Image: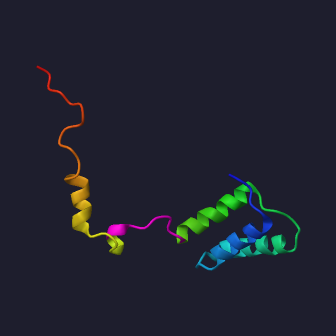
Amino acid sequence: MRLITREAQIALIARVLEYPVRDGVRLAFSKMSDQLEGGQRSLTVKQIAWIRVELDKHEPQYENLVSSGAVAPQSYVRLMVYDHPAKPPGYRRQA
């Protein structure tokens, strides 16, 4: 995991605190943010990992294109089934 600057750490915590998180998590992240803004310390690698885990719970990392309506389900099935060859290239029957 690469290290990030103090300003990026504060911004990461602020993004997590925008979401409805548990009270204990909110308190811990608020204290971390206060210490960062006061210039007292920097976050450890484990703390940054914990913040990212909490952020991943609330921010999806991908979007289902079929469910969102960006791709019609029929075209998706056609791509999966019909656009592939019946036999792999270079396939020969054994005599």
Q: Please, which residue is most extreme toward the front here?
A: 90
Q: Say which of 78 and 44 sits in front.
A: 78
Q: In the image, what residue occupies the spot 78% across and 62% down?
A: 43
Q: Residue 68 placed where, x, y %?
A: 36, 74
Q: In which quarter of the image is residue 23?
A: bottom right
- Say whether residue 6 is visible: yes
Q: In the image, what residue occupies the spot 72% across and 75% down?
A: 27
- Say whether residue 24 is visible: no
Q: Please, which residue is most extreme toward the left here?
A: 95
Residue 44 relative to residue 63: left or right: right
Q: Residue 74 placed where, x, y %?
A: 21, 66
Q: Residue 4 placed where, x, y %?
A: 74, 60
Q: Residue 82 placed where, x, y %?
A: 19, 53
Placement of the C terminus among the 4 image quadrants: top left
Q: In the image, what residue occupies the spot 24% across and 35% down?
A: 89
Which residues lie in the magenta part? Answer: 59-66
Identify the main secondary structure in magenta: loop
Its colouring scheme is rainbow
Q: In the image, what residue occupies the spot 34% across and 72% down?
A: 70
Residue 52 relative to residue 66: left or right: right
Residue 72 relative to residue 39: left or right: left
| Residue 49 on the magenta segment | no
